[in-house]
Amino acid sequence: AAVFSTSKAVVSTQSTGAWREFEMKHGTEQTQNDIAKKMPRRVKKRRKIDVEEGGEGGWEEYWDYIFPDAEANSSNLKLLQMAKMWKKQQQESSEEEDEEEEENEEEG
């Protein structure tokens, strides 16, 4: 999922919150539904705390925001990354086949 850094997320949530308040007062039902779909989800996450002495630092819990627009873009990004990996594997396998053919020609 696409996740923004906390400081950017707070600014974005404040902006969308103000936009939502405006739409609730002055907007139509359609515009209110549109902004509701764009509101970020607040998600509780955990990350490991690194300690320089090599000991275990434990886990830290924090809140993060996931924006629906960014989430949709990240799925497209994943597809693109998978396509690039597939293409790279295809190129590597064709290079290996070419090398094997050259070795067979030298032997024969």
Image (cartoon, grey):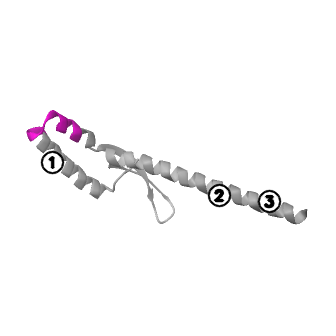
Name the residue located 12 percent from the left edge and 39 percent from the top edge: 27
Q: Eyeballing the image, is 90 above or below 44?
A: below
Q: What separation in Å lies between label 3 and label 1 (alpha carbons)?
A: 64 Å
Q: In x, y percent, where is residue 83?
A: 54, 51
- Asked if the residues shown at circle 2 and circle 3 are in contact, with their CB atoms under 8 angstroms apart, the answer is no
- Dominant secondary structure, magenta: helix
Q: The magenta stretch spans which residues? A: 24-35
Name the residue located 41 percent from the left edge and 49 percent from the top edge: 74
At mark 2, the secondary structure is helix
Name the residue located 11 percent from the left edge and 44 percent from the top edge: 22
**Mark 3 vs mark 1: which is more N-terminal?**
1
Name the residue located 34 percent from the left edge and 44 percent from the top edge: 43
Q: Which residue is mark 1?
A: 18
Q: In x, y percent, where is residue 18?
A: 15, 48
Q: Residue furthest top?
A: 29
Q: In the rendered structure, which amino acid carries the disc numbered 1? A: Ala
Q: Which residue is mark 3?
A: 100
Question: Dot 2 surroundings within 10 Å: few (below 14), some, or many (20 or more)?
Answer: few
Q: Can you tell which quarter of the image residue 21 is in?
A: top left
Q: What separation in Å lies between label 1 and label 2 (alpha carbons)?
A: 51 Å
Q: Which residue is mark 2?
A: 91
- Asked if the residues shown at circle 1 and circle 2 are in contact, with their CB atoms under 8 angstroms apart, the answer is no
**Mark 2 vs mark 3: which is more N-terminal?**
2
**Mark 1 vs mark 2: which is more N-terminal?**
1
